[in-house]
Amino acid sequence: MDGSTLGNLGPSGGGGICRDPAGSFLFAFSHAYGTGTNNRAELRALYDVMVLSANFGYDQILLESDLKCVADIFNGRSSPTWRWRYWWTRISSLKSRCTFSFSLIPREGNGPADGLAKAGAMSQIDTVYDNVNALPNYIRGLYRVPVLLGCI
């Protein structure tokens, strides 16, 4: 998952793709968050993917993001700033619904989520995709790259 802001304070959104352990598509999302900061968009995307995963019935979820400060907070290596408390409280309350683990990934590996986050910020429309073929063409292409390279 990823968050995106067009300017920092600007229109923001979040997005992500959920795969099973074999790399097969489960669902994806692109959500609009209104005007905000890039860090708030990242936290909202984290919250959204946790809610969607639990609502779809998945009980063991590996979350991946390219933002180190969020990974550090999630894994207990640091504390959220006061500005993050609202969303962090909501995120923490979800941890009891499923088993979540969090991994930091390189920005280069987060292309599909970044594209979906930017789409949410630009369109200001919320979309959940339940089929890989429903993804926008440019996202579908990015989604397939790691599989083709054998990175999954």
Image (cartoon, rainbow, N blue to C red):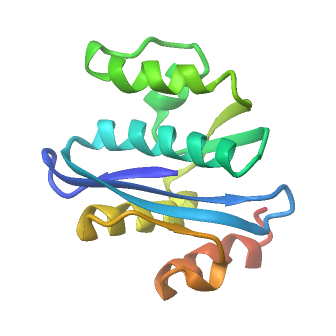
- Residue 4 vertical position relative to residue 103 in the rendered view, above or below: below
Left or right: residue 143 compared with residue 116? right
- Residue 40 vertical position relative to residue 64 in the rendered view, above or below: above
For the C terminus, the quadrant is bottom right
Q: Where is residue 119 in the image (x, y as percent from the top left)?
A: 35, 69
Name the residue rendered at 26%, 64% in the picture. Answer: 124
Left or right: residue 91 compared with residue 121? right
- Residue 124 vertical position relative to residue 139 in the rendered view, above or below: above
Q: In which quarter of the image is residue 135?
A: bottom right
Name the residue rendered at 49%, 45% in the picture. Answer: 48
Foreground pick, 43 / 75: 43
Foreground pick, 103 / 53: 53
Q: Total number of numbered labels?
A: 0
Name the residue rendered at 70%, 52% in the picture. Answer: 56
Left or right: residue 57 compared with residue 14? right
Q: Position of residue 95 (x, y in %)?
A: 64, 24
Q: Where is residue 27 in the image (x, y as percent from the top left)?
A: 65, 64
Q: In which quarter of the image is residue 117?
A: bottom left
Name the residue rendered at 48%, 33% in the picture. Answer: 68
Q: Where is residue 109 in the image (x, y as percent from the top left)?
A: 58, 59
- Residue 85 vertical position relative to residue 41 in the rendered view, above or below: above
Left or right: residue 40 compared with residue 53? left
